[in-house]
Image: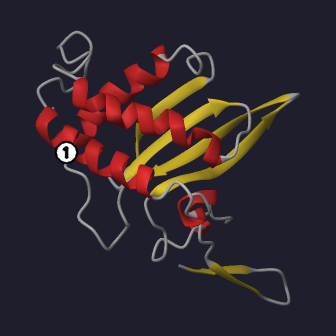
Amino acid sequence: MELIQSFTVDHTRIVPGIFTSRVDRLGDSCVTTYDVRLKKPNREPVIDVAAMHTLEHIIATFLCNDPDWKDEVVYWGPMGCLTGFYLILKGDRKPQDLHGLLLRAFRSVDDAQEVPGATAVNCGHYLMHNLPMAKWYAKAFADYLEANARNSAIFEYPKAEQLVTDDGRRFFDS
């Protein structure tokens, strides 16, 4: 069975950043999934679940209302490993092209006075939010993005070493 694309990334070497996870062609158009990684997997504590949920709500709302990007946004949601988010956009842009947008999105969390959609009608677990912690994580990531804007490592996935046997079987060492 083929490994999915995200399992071919060397999670022992990935750093926080913005990465192209996959590009899916749909006829003449495409959608691209971006890995927006806030934490070093398996080396740092994961993002607090309630804060992650809050970041999901605030940043999804920001992205879907940004006048320049809202028509491109398909999805924003958390990774199961709680180290970052997936952003799915129409088209195929370089991760560097998203730097400014995501910097603004994470900076906007500091201005939030409440969590959008945090009601029983709008959310499946509306009591599980932590706005102060979300602000802390957002500031830390925004500061990191700003400080590392010219660092190519925050835009390029470290690929797992791959052994291919003579008969074509692939093994991933990650």
Kindly identify the residue that appears in the image at 26 percent across and 15 percent down: 117
Amino acid type of disc 1?
Trp
- Residue 92 appears at what percent x and percent y? 74, 38
Residue 75 visible: yes
The furthest residue to the top: 121
Q: Classify residue 103 as left or right of residue 51.
A: right
Kindly identify the residue that appears in the image at 61 percent across and 52 percent down: 21
Kindly identify the residue that appears in the image at 62 percent across and 16 percent down: 71
Q: Quadrant of residue 38?
A: bottom left
| Residue nearest the viewer, comparing 149 with 91 | 149
Kindly identify the residue that appears in the image at 57 percent across and 45 percent down: 34
Q: In which quarter of the image is residue 115?
A: top left
Residue 56 visible: no
Q: Classify residue 127 as left or right of residue 28.
A: left
Q: Classify residue 96 as left or right of residue 99.
A: right
29 w.r.t. 79: above or below:
above
150 w.r.t. 32: above or below:
below
Which color scheme is applied? Answer: secondary structure
The quarter of the rendered structure image containing the N terminus is bottom right
- Residue 32 appears at what percent x and percent y? 67, 39
Mark count: 1
- Residue 73 appears at what percent x and percent y? 57, 24
| Residue nearest the viewer, comparing 149 with 35 | 149
Query: Could you tell me which secondary element the residue under label 1 belongs to?
Result: helix
The furthest residue to the bottom: 166
Q: Mark 1 points at which residue?
A: 136
Q: In which quarter of the image is residue 88?
A: top right
- Residue 153 appears at what percent x and percent y? 56, 66
Alpha-carbon neighbours of circle 1 within 10 Å: few (<14), some, or many (≥20)? few
